Amino acid sequence: MVEQPCVVSTLDAHNDSIILREVHQAPLDFADCNPAYHVDLPRLRAGGITTVFVMVGDSDLLQSLRLIDAVWAMAQNHPDDLAVCLDREQVQAVHAMGRIALVMTIEGQAMFAERLENVRNWHRLGVRVASLTHGEGNRGGRGTALQYDSSHFGYLDPSARNRLRQRTRGLTPFAVEALQELARLRMPVDLAHVNEAAFWEVLERAEGPVCYTHGNCYSLCPHTRNCTDDMLRALAARGGVIGICFYGCFVDRDQPSLERLVDHFLHALEVAGEDHVGVGTDFDGIGAHEVPVISDAAGLPQLWQALARRGVGDAVLHKVAQGNFLRLLP
């Protein structure tokens, strides 16, 4: 008997499709069906993705403004399918009407040029989740990055990673101010690209919600963008959520596969707990010549079927698929 698709209403906590389309000078619209991208409206529907955290900027202020305008325009042009949402209640109302919720996020604040009013302005424009950095550093106080040392991107064994952490400097003074403002605005802080010293500083200082929108488990794949077990436990202790990512380099150093991706979900569930694991695909955010473990938005049912085969029950599946990240929204 042919296995039926297991479509579960899913929140994708990290999607780069709009910024990639802008870079390619393509239409900034999910309704533009283009196989060059991992995401479009029909594939979101087919995969059961009902909430998308849309990344709308990191280091270029004017680009970010264009992307924000594009998201609002996309919702206005397709009112039966898409809606910008500013809080959890709006997301739930949009789902009840059969539409897809768009929640805008930023992947860094270097573009704010250490002006706290820009944090407030981006919130006024509709951004609801904010990373402090996209990995850039500011050693010596030059520039406007929110961490002193840039984040390492690549494979390191545990001893090398520990040595790197010991010599790494974390948050700048403006980052501390930004954390306070994000807490006041009830905006979750995304830790996915911060260096490891900054990760621990944020958990110590942040008064508002925290998350790690796209990354995996270091104990299964020794990439520095993946969380160690200590990081997973600490994130969970703060009520945070990690979005397990489909990027092959984070899944396995040698042979990324669906089953190996499921291993990351199961490990995160075991270490962090069922209330602290979600999905952060990184669709359209990986290298141009790389294919994610699940190749596009329509493929999400493969994940839920594989997790169910490995013994994950319906209640946990629904937490992972949507509920855990949704809980972080105001």
Image (cartoon, rainbow, N blue to C red):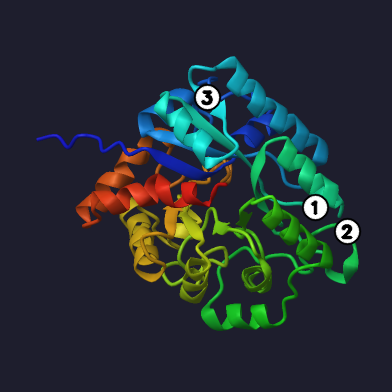
Q: Which residue is mark 3?
A: 82
Tell me the distance, in whole angstroms, between the alpha carbons under discs 1 and 3. 29 Å
The crowd level at tag 2 (other Cα within 10 Å; few <14, some 14-19, many 20+) is some
Which residue is identified by label 1? 110
Query: Reading the chain from its start, which is encountered first: label 2 or label 3?
Result: 3
Q: Nearer the viewer, residue 264 or 204?
A: 204
Taking depth in this image into account, of 155 and 245 the one nearest to the observer is 245
Q: Amino acid at mark 1?
A: Ala
Q: Which numbered disc covers residue 143?
A: 2
Residue 17: x, y in percent?
58, 35
Q: Quadrant of residue 266?
A: bottom left
The image shows residue 208, relative to residue 198, as above or below, that is above
Placement of 67 over or under 106, stated as above or below: above
- Image point (83%, 52%), residue name: 116
Q: Is residue 9 above or below residue 71?
A: below
The picture quadrant where one finds residue 261 is: bottom left
In the image, taking residue 4 as reference, residue 105 lies left or right, namely right
Mark 1: secondary structure: helix
- Image location of residue 90, percent across then percent down: 52, 34
Residue 178 in the image: x percent, y percent? 76, 58
Q: Residue at x 36, y 51 (%)?
A: 319
Q: Tell me, yes or no, if residue 183 can be seen here.
A: yes
Residue 280 visible at all: no
The residue shown at (70%, 33%) is: 23
For marks 1 and 2, the one nearer the N-term is: 1
Q: Nearer the viewer, residue 61 or 206?
A: 206
